[in-house]
């Protein structure tokens, strides 16, 4: 079941509630693990998980709201221009979240528990992919995205590009590749979502760009 259609404020609150459900699930299992294995130290990993979940509760609702707000831009402006700030926001989101995620997921047990909780809370990958795919599909129906574009596949690639830039920065440093702004432009441009300019209009397009 997909996340229900809600007003922006309601959607933000709903996402926060779902993250709290994940945190509650993780905490409950931590308590059970501590009771079953009192000789194992959980404090350090537990604190890292708490920090990650606190950051997720702050960042994820805003990120999903940015994605859902694309629906307000259907048929307006330029598709690539509409997507550019989304790509930049995605890089920022993944960079923030994954810096806290790495120290939290230090054991397979924690990873599996989080995966289960995320699935139960319906905050898996499609919660990010679907609103972006819906926007691309709507623009496609309006003739502003190429007819041969797969909206879901393109949404996956778009988010994967944002994720990869954040990953590279985390492990190799901010100077290891193009800037976040330049990378955002590359992600949007190289997906080649918009129709080519008709013959005879290319010069006008180049002049305006």
Image (cartoon, grey):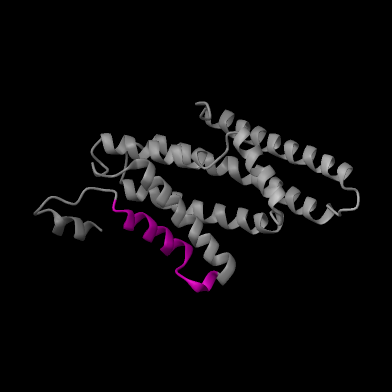
Q: Position of residue 11 (x, y in %)?
A: 56, 31
Count the numbered circles shown.
Answer: 0
Tell me where residue 6 appears, x and y as whole percent. Answer: 52, 26
Provide residue 155's location: percent of width, then percent of height: 40, 45
Q: Is residue 64 left or right of residue 191?
A: right
- Residue 19 relative to residue 30: left or right: left
Q: Which residues are magenta?
A: 174-192
The quadrant the C terminus occupies is bottom left
Q: Give percent across and percent down for residue 117.
A: 66, 38
Residue at x 46%, y 50% (from the top left corner): 159
Q: Main secondary structure of the magenta part?
A: helix
Q: Is residue 176 magenta?
A: yes
Residue placed at 40% from the left, 35% from the top? Answer: 71
Residue 9 position (above or below residue 163) = above
Between 26 and 167, the residue placed more toward the observer is: 26
Outermost bottom residue: 175
Q: Is residue 79 above or below residue 18?
A: below
Q: Is residue 75 visible?
A: no
Query: In the rendered image of this protein, does residue 29 appear above or below residue 188?
Result: above
Q: Could one spot residue 126 in this view of the protein?
A: yes
Point out the residue furthest to the left here: 200
Taking the image as shown, residue 57 lies to the left or right of residue 160, namely: right
Q: Nearer the viewer, residue 52 or 78?
A: 52
Q: Closer to the camera, 39 or 198?
A: 39
At x 70% / y 36%, what residue is drawn? 20
Is 31 included in the stretch rendered in magenta? no
């Amino acid at each position: 079941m997909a996340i229900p259609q809600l007003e922006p404020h309601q959607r933000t609150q709903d996402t926060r509630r779902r993250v709290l459900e994940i945190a509650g699930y993780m905490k409950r299992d931590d308590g059970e693990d501590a009771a079953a294995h009192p000789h194992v130290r959980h404090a350090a990993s537990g604190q890292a998980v708490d920090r990650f979940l606190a950051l997720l509760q702050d960042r994820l609702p805003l990120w999903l709201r940015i994605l859902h707000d694309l629906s307000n831009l259907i048929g307006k402006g330029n598709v690539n221009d509409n997507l550019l700030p989304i790509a930049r926001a995605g890089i920022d989101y993944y960079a923030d979240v994954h810096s806290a995620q790495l120290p939290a997921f230090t054991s397979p047990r924690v990873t599996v528990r989080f995966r289960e909780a995320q699935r139960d809370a319906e905050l898996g990958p499609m919660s990010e992919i679907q609103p972006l795919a819906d926007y691309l599909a709507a623009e496609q129906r309006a003739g502003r995205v190429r007819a041969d574009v797969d909206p879901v596949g393109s949404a996956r690639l778009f988010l994967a590009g944002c994720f990869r830039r954040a990953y590279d920065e985390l492990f190799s440093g901010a100077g290891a590749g193009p800037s976040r702004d330049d990378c955002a432009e590359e992600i949007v441009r190289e997906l080649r979502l918009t129709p080519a300019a008709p013959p005879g209009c290319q010069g006008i397009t180049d002049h305006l760009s």
